Amino acid sequence: MKNQSHSNWESVAGIWQHRPPIVPDPEDIGFFERAAAAATTNNALRALLLGVTGGIATMQWPATVRLTAVDWSAGMIKKAWPRTGLPVDAAVVLADWMAMPLDERSCDVALGDGCYTALGSLDAAVELNRAVARVLEPGGVLALRCFARGEKRASVDEIFDELLAGNETNLGLFRWRLLMALQGDGVSGVVLDDAWRVWHERVPEPEQYIERFGWFAHEVDHIARYAGQQACYVFPTVDELEAAAPDFELTECDIPTYRCGAHFPRLVFVKRG
């Protein structure tokens, strides 16, 4: 997986600072806590975390949990992996999700936030699901919050009209909505440099809006770092994600109640026996 996407994550690791819904809010954390509790047997849990999402790593876990987080970016591990608030038996591993150094059937639950988007294609999503199925017990749970373009989304023009009218101040959410709009109805993802070009054409001098609209400078910087990046992000629909998980049964699709929640569905898959 160490490709264009990997280089992008190393680039943004140094400025990693996001707010909900780009990172999980308390409602999302409650979803992950329930999924972990449901997968616990005899008060014990073997948990896999895809990535180093701090809110999940430090959530309320069952009393006896062995947590292993796997991330392919050394920069993200250094920046985002919590130093406090973790379960006693917690470890982080630098490795590719497609080749995790874990034994077969060694986990009861796998959790992750936005994992499919960074892979860049539905084919890669299928590969990830296969890799997770290998390390899960039959009946094991894969619980994910996904970034999905959905059936209803604003157009590129509508998103920029809203932004430049001062009605959208969360540039992290704007950035995700822009990428989803650029992907449109196709299954192919969006090259980050293409998104930056659209942004730069319409907002050539974003600094003038930072004070005017209350934009966060680090969020402007995050978009600027898309310039020249050939990494591809993909925003599948729920139906596409279900089809990409043949080793699993989709048992739950929970839509958050917060703004634009339809773009952040929370899915529970159960590994087939």
Image: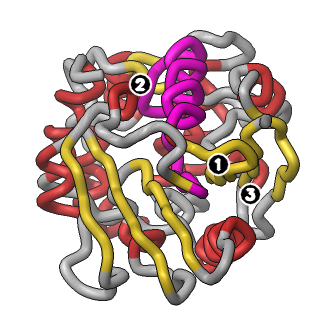
| Relative horizontal placement of residue 210, taking residue 109 as reference (left or right) | left
Q: Give the percent coordinates (x, y) of residue 210.
A: 30, 62
* Amino acid, disc 3: Gly
In the figure, 271 relative to 194: above or below? below
Count of labels in the image: 3
**Residue 261 tag number:** 3
Magenta stretch: dominant secondary structure: helix
Residue 103 among magenta residues: no
Disc 2 to disc 3: CB gap under 8 Å = no
* Amino acid, disc 2: Ala
Write down the residue under mark 1: 142
Looking at the image, can residue 81 be seen? yes
Disc 2 to disc 1: CB gap under 8 Å = no
Q: Give the percent coordinates (x, y) of residue 128.
A: 51, 27
| Relative horizontal placement of residue 26, taking residue 71 as reference (left or right) | right
Q: Residue at x 40, y 40 (%)?
A: 103
* Amino acid, disc 1: Leu
Write down the residue under mark 2: 195
**Residue 25 tag number:** none
Q: Earlier in the sequence, mark 3 or mark 1?
A: 1
Colour mode? secondary structure
Q: Magenta stretch?
A: 108-134
Could you tell me which secondary element the residue under label 2 belongs to?
helix
Q: CA distance from mark 3 to mark 1?
A: 20 Å
Q: CA distance from mark 2 to mark 1?
A: 31 Å
Q: Nearer the viewer, residue 134 or 165?
A: 134
